[in-house]
């Protein structure tokens, strides 16, 4: 099934989902589906999860891998159990106090 959404060259309030194509990254108003369009590959996903567990914030990972913060958080929340995610987030908050 083809994507029925619209895309934009820049990120806007409506176009928040990153998409990869042969010209680079564009922004869509519909979430990504299908493995062909995933920005986070299995190999990269493992690195992101490991670094997140080590204390890297999603903002730091966004800068390092040039992947949108929301996309990284959605990925991490999908992989980690809710209580594990919240435990890691609590540790980060306590480190900065």
Image (tube, rainbow, N blue to C red):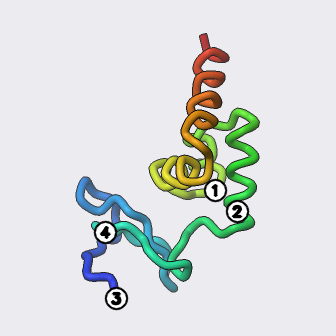
* Quarter holding residue 30: bottom left
Q: Which residue is mark 3?
A: 2
Do the residues bearing badges 2 and 1 touch, measured as CB atoms within 8 Å? yes
The structure residue drawn at horizontal position 37% and vertical position 67%, both measured from the top left corner, is: 31
Q: Give the percent coordinates (x, y) of residue 28.
A: 33, 69
Mark 3 vs mark 1, foreground winner is 3
Mark 1 vs mark 4, foreground winner is 4
Q: Which residue is mark 2?
A: 44
The structure residue drawn at horizontal position 76% and vertical position 36%, both measured from the top left corner, is: 54
Q: Give the percent coordinates (x, y) of residue 80.
A: 62, 46
* Quarter holding residue 35: bottom right
Mark 2 residue crowding within 10 angstroms, few (<14) / some (14–19) / many (20+): few
The secondary structure type at the circle numbered 1 is helix
In three-dimensional space, the C-alpha distance between marks 3 and 1, rounded to whole angstroms, equals 27 Å
Q: Give the percent coordinates (x, y) of residue 82.
A: 55, 39
For the N terminus, the quadrant is bottom left
Mark number for residue 65?
Answer: 1
Mark number for residue 73?
Answer: none
Do the residues bearing badges 2 and 3 touch, measured as CB atoms within 8 Å? no
């Amino acid at each position: 099934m083809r994507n029925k959404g619209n895309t934009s060259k820049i990120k806007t309030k409506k176009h928040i989902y990153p998409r990869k194509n042969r010209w680079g990254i564009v922004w869509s108003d519909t979430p990504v589906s299908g493995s062909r369009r995933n920005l986070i590959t299995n190999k990269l996903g493992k690195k992101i999860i490991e670094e997140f567990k080590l204390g890297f914030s999603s903002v730091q990972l966004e800068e390092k891998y040039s992947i949108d913060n929301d996309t990284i958080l959605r990925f991490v929340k999908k992989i980690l159990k809710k209580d594990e995610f919240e435990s890691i987030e609590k540790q980060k908050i306590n480190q900065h106090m």
